Image (spheres, grey):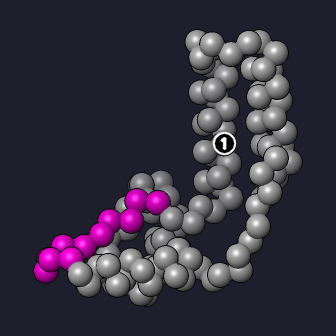
Amino acid sequence: MIQIKECNEPLVDIKKCCPDIIINLGTKRMQKEKTAYLRKTVAEMICRAEKELPEGTTFIIGDAWRPQYIQKEVLNWFIKHFLKSTQIGLKRKLLMRLKNMLLYLKENMLPDI
């Protein structure tokens, strides 16, 4: 299992750092979230890079920090599509181990909020 280690760097609203940047997280996410949050140093690097772009040009942020409901959707999508696909050439035993691992992650790592 990969151990996640928090770096404790704050998340910041990218629009507050770079007001001209375009955020497009998808219609569904934008209805709920309205903005994108990035680690502070990442936001600062994007802002510095944006200043080097030609006039009238900016970055489009297509993904950022993912709230738990998005993490669950991504995991559910992966499980659904992974379990549908048996043409990947894995032995049945390995396929079942992967299925059980994914189900464990779904149930224990991303509890209902």
Which residue occupies the foreground of this view, 90 or 82?
90
Residue 15 visible? The answer is no
Give the total number of marks visible in the rendering: 1
Is 1 situated above or below 21?
above
- 108 or 52, which is in the foreground? 52
Q: Position of residue 14 (x, y in %)?
A: 44, 79
Instruction: Locate residue 88: give its quadrant.
Output: top right
Q: Tell me the kind of residue under disc 1.
A: Leu
Q: Tell me residue 75's x, y (percent).
A: 66, 42
Relative image position of residue 93 (x, y in whole percent): 82, 15
In magenta segment, residue 59: yes
Q: Is residue 74 above or below residue 94?
A: below
Left/right placement of residue 54 relative to residue 12 reads: left
Position of the C terminus, as image quadrant, is bottom right
Q: Position of residue 19 (x, y in %)?
A: 34, 84
Q: Residue at x 84, y 39 (%)?
A: 104
Please say if 106 is above or below 31. Answer: above
Residue displayed at 78% across by 43% down? 106
| Residue located at (75% from left, 20% from top) | 95
Q: Quadrant of residue 84?
A: top right
- Residue 69 sits in quarter: bottom right
Horizontal side, residue 29 vs residue 23: left or right? right
Look at 41% across and 55% down and name the residue there: 27
Q: Which residues are magenta?
A: 53-63
The residue that mark 1 highlights is 75
Foreground of the two, 31 or 25: 25
Local crowd size for mark 1, using a 10 Å CA cut-off: few (<14), some (14–19), many (≥20): some
